[in-house]
Image: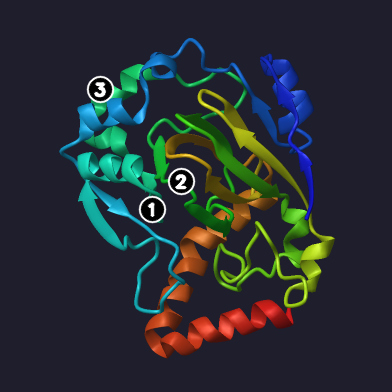
Amino acid sequence: MQLQEITRVHTITKKEFLRDYVKPQKPVVIEHLIDDWKAYDKWNLAYIKDIAGDKEVPLYDDRPVKHDEGFNQAHATMSMSAYVDLLKKEPTNYRIFLYNLMKEVPSLKEDFKFPKIGLRLLKQIPMLFFGGEGSKVFMHHDIDWANILHFHFEGKKQCVLFPPSETPHLYKVPYSLITREDINFDDPDYDKFPNLKKAKGFICHLNHGETLYMPEGYWHYMKYETPGFSMSLRALPRKMSNLRKALYNVFYMRHYDNFMRRRKGQAWIDEKNERAMSN
């Protein structure tokens, strides 16, 4: 695919970050933004198991969307201790997605700080994401069109991004936040999905302690190259047009989609996938 490496910087000032990346809406990897966090030294899978091992956590895999499953409905649950053991034992498709572990284990909040980098970060929802070797997060964009700081811990993670301008080439599924789920973004089938040849995006490989800035509405596909986990902090979209899109998604789109799933069942899912191709 037409992917260019995301720019990397060692450190960055607030002025540089706003001028060079937020204002022009360009992604960047900041290698040493959080070196002064306690989490930089403390956060690994063993520490999470020790401090939160008894917590029951929601798990997701890579099965296709089903009409009878709700928005972000978990596929299974497991204790955090058992899940970390599974991650270390063998590759698994089970992931933890959008999990507010801070609510369950408040002491984790003492391990990080909200970076003073020019974004008005929402302090109520620091979210954690876990994955095993080879597990993938389907190509999607976030419902709230947020500006996202994505911090990675332990191991390595591949991130593929596309700006919103590339949406016409990505086979977006109507009334959803995803592309066609049968697209393999590691090895696309250009005979079936020829428009992907036109899509221009970005790629990076995050290491422990590195931060990825994802601008508003960016599509992202994640693959855990080793077992690990990440945390995201988010800020509301700065562009009024993107804020309107976020409000539409939250207050209309997802509710309409759930209504149509109940009304038409699997036929609704099939119809949306067909429209992604015809569009």
Where residue 202 appears, as percent x and y from the top left, is 74, 44
Screen quadrant of the N terminus: bottom right
Q: Is residue 64 left or right of residue 189?
A: left
**In the image, which is nearer the foreground, mark 2 or mark 3?**
2
Q: Is residue 1 left or right of residue 107?
A: right
Can you identify the residue that label 1 sits on? 92
**In the image, which is nearer the foreground, mark 1 or mark 3?**
1
Which residue appears at 51% of the width and 23% of the height? 209
Distance from disc 2 to disc 1, alpha carbons, whole Å, reads 7 Å
Q: Is residue 243 left or right of residue 42?
A: right
Disc 2 marks which amino acid?
A: Glu
Disc 1 marks which amino acid?
A: Thr
Where residue 215 appears, as percent x and y from the top left, is 66, 40
Disc 3 marks which amino acid?
A: Ser
Instruction: Name the residue at the front extreme.
Output: 89
Which residue appears at 48% of the width and 59% of the height? 250
The reply to whether the C-beta atoms of the residues labelled 2 and 1 are less than 8 Å apart is yes
